[in-house]
Image (cartoon, grey):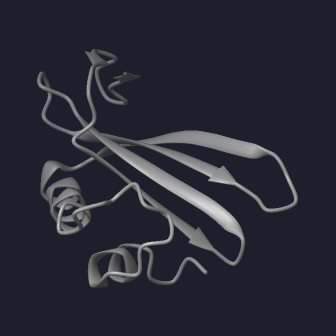
Amino acid sequence: MADCTKCGAKVSGSEVCISAELSGDEYTECWYLCGKCHVYSVESFTEQFAGDEKSRVEGPIPKEEGDRKVALAKQCDTPREKKCDCPAHKKYFEGMS
């Protein structure tokens, strides 16, 4: 559950979460769509190989932009699989390593 970054409404259930392991660090992004104001908030988690876990919430993200990222993540059958090397994972996390 997350709070909408625009209106503050509680948003239960993410649209999708996608994870990757890049250079020993683990990344997860979970996308939440607010039913009231129709913008996305994204909760990001980073667990560094030699460090602590960090989290942050970003947004509001326009629906059109969020829809593209969510659709890309959903192209993978196992988006939470951090070692997946499918085309969707590669494109989603492109430039992050």
Question: Which residue occupies the foreground of this view, 74 or 38?
Answer: 74
Whether residue 12 sits left or right of residue 82 in the image: it is left
Question: Which residue occupies the foreground of this view, 85 or 33?
Answer: 85
Q: Residue at x 33, y 59 (%)?
A: 79
Point out the image quarter for the C terminus: bottom right
Count all numbered tags in the image, as a single digit.
0
Q: State the image coordinates of residue 66 (x, y, percent, origin top left).
A: 22, 54
Question: Which residue occupies the foreground of this view, 73 or 43?
Answer: 73
Whether residue 84 sits left or right of residue 14 in the image: it is right
Whether residue 42 sits left or right of residue 33 in the image: it is right
Q: Residue at x 19, y 29 (%)?
A: 34
Quarter-wise, where is residue 31 in the image? top left
Q: State the image coordinates of residue 68 (x, y, percent, origin top left).
A: 17, 64
Whether residue 5 sits left or right of residue 43 in the image: it is left
Q: Residue at x 26, y 63 (%)?
A: 73
Q: State the image coordinates of residue 86 (x, y, percent, origin top left).
A: 32, 81
Quarter-wise, where is residue 6 in the image? top left
